[in-house]
Image (cartoon, rainbow, N blue to C red):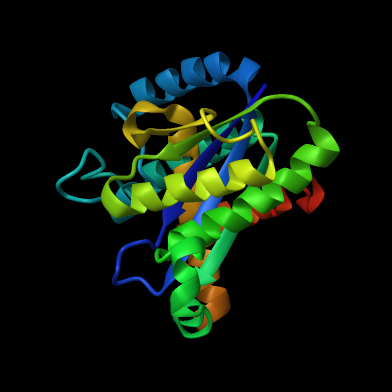
Amino acid sequence: MVNVYIDDSGTAPSQRIAIASALIIPAIRIRRLETEWSNFCTKYEISDFHSSECVSRNPKKQFAGWDDIKVNKALSRVGQITKKYGVRAFSYAVKKTDYDDLMPEKWKDFAGKHHYTWAIKHVLRLLRDWDASTNPNNPVEYFFDWQEGEPRKEIERMMSHEEIVRPGKYEEHYSFSKRAEIPALQCTDLLAWSSFSRARHFFENTPMNEHAERVYIDFRDHRNQSWLT
């Protein structure tokens, strides 16, 4: 069995790009990951990890007062854990204006009114391709970062649509969890955050945050550039 952890970035209305990222971790590795993650949090005296809050050293969060050296070391350690336990990673970016301009309004009831839903749909396609070639006939469980209201309902409708394509693969095989409670989702957060910075650079020529660029290159080059799509 494998677990797939899916996180978002850029879903705030003020952002122009939305990201869905997925991290695949064999279920048998989860307990070891959680033990290693607990040691990491104890060492850095934090309850959980959040990439943007760490890098910005949010004064209202537990990363206030950190210096560049500590931020770099923490990001590096999270990256190491992510690569150690994750066997594959996928990210998909949606430029919101493109989606809004090109997607007919009448189709959005099916495709999704939220850009993140469209990104998830494509990540699931990438996951299906990987599953068919690498993990055929073995169960997959999906863990989404917590959503509420209409965004959550839209993801649930999308998963019902996917169930029609692959019966028995999606319904009752996914759940929503709070990132702060799931170490694997906190690893996926780093993947989504760095991929978001890369997408902004690609679509808008926005200079990448130096921390995000370092993390992204590390993920991109892992296993001879075969780990992250």
Q: Residue furthest left?
A: 60
Q: In the figure, residue 93 lies in which quadrant?
A: bottom right
Image position of 158 (left or right of 228): left
Report x, y in % for residue 191.
53, 48
Direction from residue 199 to residue 44 in the image, left or right: left
- Residue 83's place in the image compared with 11, above or below, is above
Residue extending furthest toward the bottom = 101
Query: Residue pushed farthest right?
Result: 133
Is the residue 37 above or below the residue 207 in the image?
above
Q: Residue at x 68, y 52 (%)?
A: 125
* Quadrant location of the N terminus in the rendered image: top right
Mark yes or no: residue 228 visible.
Answer: no
Residue at the (58%, 76%) spot, across then down: 202
Q: How many marks?
A: 0
Which residue does the image show at 22% across and 38% down from the upper left? 62
Residue nearer the viewer, 187 or 113: 113
**Residue 104 visible, this angle:** yes
Q: Nearer the viewer, residue 104 or 224?
A: 104
- Image quadrant holding the C terminus, namely bottom right
Image position of 47 with respect to 211: above or below: above
Give how far across and how far down residue 40 sits, in percent: 43, 25
